[in-house]
Image (tube, rainbow, N blue to C red):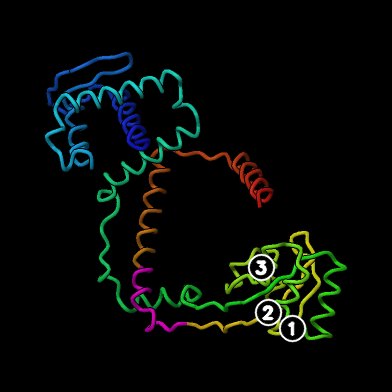
């Protein structure tokens, strides 16, 4: 319902900005007027076309009377009028939602005009192979690391490390005995099986150094002292072009569309004389990056 109201709001605002609501040479009667706008036959007809697909009326079309459609349309206009009176449309968060729906709607209406359809069968094996060779990392099965972690105070870690190294205590058992975190104790410290890229940046250099069955640490990661243990590590595997040929063809197709759309956006920026304040934008990037780092 929120999306419907926002969409109606943006369409009404557009209509108000663009003058008469009827098409070229098309006559339509005004059914109601109100401060800041009006409701015409064409408006209500558009509401009808939308509502008749709604689950509430799809199986009970008899309940979708002209009176119901008009009341629905007018009620939406009143909610929009109230929001405009309160200047909700000036709130950046509201504008973001309105613009998101507006751009999505316009994109769907204009996409066939802006970018020609590219058929998948048009992509030759040679073209797909060239894409594969340029993006081999996309078709590699990454090495998977099965890591366990023990987090505790330095003195406790020293006791745990001695028990593992000198007494042969299984690392998972050492975690259950010594870990400060209850969840870590219950899981035996396992982080699951994941590729190096799925570890947080501060962890990656340490995980990459681990050897199966060898204790690592103590080491400080993310401000806490930890011991690490590698249960297992799979070897990476590079899929051949033939193994991933159809996936490569799809990826090549998507790349063509991305390039086509980028060309469209570049042309639009030129058409509408976009001027970017590089200094201010750079400061904004730096501020946002700092805030994001603080949230991590």
Q: Residue at x 70, y 68 (%)?
A: 185
Mark 1 or mark 2, earlier in chain: 1
Mark 1–mark 2 CB contact (< 8 Å):
yes
Disc 2 on helix, strand or loop?
strand
Tell me where the magenta segment starts and ends, as one range: 239-252
Q: Which residue is mark 2?
A: 230
Q: What is the x, y in percent for residue 138?
A: 47, 73
Dot 1 or dot 3, earlier in sequence: 3
The mark nearer the N terminus, 2 or 3, is 3
Relative to residue 221, is residue 87 drawn left or right? Answer: left
Residue position for label 3 = 186
Q: Are marks 2 and 3 in contact (CB under 8 Å)?
A: no
Question: Considering only vertical position in the picture, is 216 above or below 49?
Answer: below
Few, some or many C-alpha atoms within 10 Å of disc 1 (few <14, some 14-19, many ≥20)?
some
Q: Front-most of 282 and 154?
A: 154
Would residue 155 appear left or right of 130 to someone viewing this image? right
């Amino acid at each position: 319902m929120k999306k419907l109201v926002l969409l109606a709001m943006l369409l009404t605002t557009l209509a108000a900005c663009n003058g008469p609501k009827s098409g070229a040479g098309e006559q339509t009667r005004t059914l109601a007027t109100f401060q800041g706008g009006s409701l015409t036959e064409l408006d209500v007809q558009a509401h009808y076309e939308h509502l008749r697909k709604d689950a509430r009326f799809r199986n009970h079309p008899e309940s979708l009377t002209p009176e119901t459609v008009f009341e629905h349309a007018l009620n939406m206009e009143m909610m929009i009028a109230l929001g405009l009176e309160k200047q909700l449309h000036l709130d950046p968060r509201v504008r973001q939602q309105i613009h998101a729906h507006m751009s999505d709607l316009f994109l769907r209406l204009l996409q066939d005009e802006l970018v020609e359809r590219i058929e998948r069968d048009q992509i030759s094996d040679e073209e797909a192979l060239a894409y594969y060779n340029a993006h081999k990392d996309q078709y590699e099965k990454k090495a998977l690391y099965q890591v366990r972690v023990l987090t505790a105070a330095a003195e406790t870690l020293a006791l745990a490390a001695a028990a593992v190294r000198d007494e042969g205590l299984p690392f998972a058992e050492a975690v259950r005995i010594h870990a400060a975190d209850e969840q870590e104790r219950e899981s035996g410290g396992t982080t699951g099986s994941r590729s190096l890229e799925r570890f947080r940046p501060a962890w990656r250099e340490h995980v990459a150094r681990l050897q199966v069955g060898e204790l690592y640490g103590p080491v400080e990661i993310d401000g806490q002292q930890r011991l690490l243990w590698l249960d297992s590590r799979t070897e990476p595997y590079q899929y051949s072009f033939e193994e991933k040929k159809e996936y490569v063809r799809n990826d090549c197709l998507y790349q063509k569309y991305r390039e086509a759309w980028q060309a469209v956006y570049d042309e639009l920026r030129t058409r509408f004389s976009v001027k970017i304040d590089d200094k201010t934008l750079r400061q904004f990037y730096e501020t946002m990056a700092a805030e994001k780092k603080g949230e991590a």
